[in-house]
Image (spheres, helix red, strand yellow):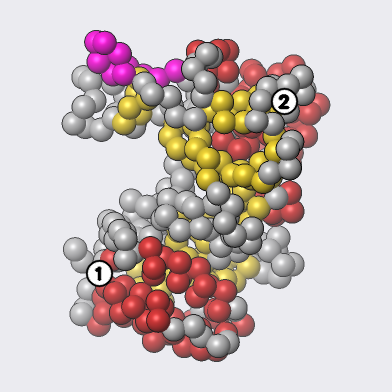
Amino acid sequence: MSLSSAFKEKSFGDLPGWDEDDHLAAFAAFKHSAFHVLTKPYRTGSLGVAFAAFAEAYTEARSVSPANRSEARSFFERYFAPALVAAGGGAGLVTGFYEPEVEASPVRTERFTVPLLSRPADLVDIDDKNRPLGMDPYLAFARATMTGPVEYFDRGAIERGALSGRNLEIAWLADKVDAFFIHVQGAARLKMADGRLCRVTYAAKSGQRFTGPGRILSETGEIPLEKVTMQSIRAWFKAHPQRVDEILWQNRSYIFFREAPVDDPELGPIAAAKVPLTPGRSVAVDRLLHTFGTPFYIVAPTLTAFGGKPFRRLMIAQDTGSAITGAARGDLFAGSGDAAGEIAGVVRNVADFYALVPRGLFDRGHA
């Protein structure tokens, strides 16, 4: 597979603020992927950044620990060459995501009435090998029945009780909107009423397309598009509690979870690349196009939510998402808890993406 023409080779001198970044923090995130690939290699994305080309960089990352930012920067400059990623006719875009932290109960109580559910036994994976004729090709999950797979219950049906009585409840929350945003983020830390801190992460979904409440509220004139943020959506729901179901049930997709440990409170959940996310250094990308583990230097001059300065950071591709599509599209992991949510909720900024491509791919003339 050849390296795509979407990558335009540059020099590190072309990267705004490159010398000022904390490359040591990015190296720590990269090292998580370097160890994971010993268990299972990453799939090469269709843009041609071959997983095999990372071998030397991963080997050194597993065996060294740079003493400072300068040594970490030298590591990336030694093994990679920067390439501007073509945005496909438009500008690149970054958004933000985080791991919510909410109070929860292991049992239903008068206060805690909204469940987070584990994967049902009748939810099956669907692909072109077992998809019934006429089933929406988008669906990656379905419901097993005696006559074959059918579309799974959607959000509205599940919240009205379609799965009641199956003992799927992992934990109970006090607020339906909190639960919904946990679905959007795909993970959460739960502060249990008995004092425990636990985590839930994505296990599966009902399969239908995601329809964000921000889009619905802007299209119906409730919130101007330019003012749609997580905070403005939450404020609207708080002011219109009687309309929460009306809006949320238009998003037919429903997420199922599994329990996971909180091994390191400083790190986020284990995501699609099978490593814990690093706040401010892990980015979700289009996994069909890009290869997990790829470093991206992202420049977003109008984004100041991370530290108060224009965003210019080296990030590592370690997650993906159904809304993250396109070569120059990324979702920045802000961390866990309310403070991270305040950052993630306002991120929607134009950005330039520079992929750090293993040097061998350019040296062999694949550009």
Q: Residue at x 30, y 13 (%)?
A: 145
Contact (Cβ within 8 Å) of mark 2 with mark 1: no
Q: Is residue 147 magenta?
A: yes
On the image, the x and y values in percent for residue 29 come to 50, 68
Q: Of the numbered discs in the image, which one, if any, rests on residue 177?
A: none
Q: Is residue 308 left or right of residue 260?
A: right
Residues drawn in magenta = 144-153
Front residue of 135/195: it is 195
Which type of secondary structure does the marked residue at label 2 adopt?
A: loop
On the image, the x and y values in percent for residue 138 come to 34, 31
On the image, the x and y values in percent for residue 99 come to 62, 48
The kind of secondary structure the magenta stretch mainly shows is: loop
Instruction: Locate the C terminus and report the quarter of the image it occupies.
Output: bottom left
Looking at the image, the residue that sits furthest to the right is 239
Which residue carries the number 2 mark? 112
Q: Residue at x 59, y 60 (%)?
A: 264
Examine the image and state in which quarter residue 274 appears: bottom left
Q: Residue at x 40, y 81 (%)?
A: 63
Which residue carries the number 1 mark? 52
Q: Amino acid at mark 1?
A: Ala
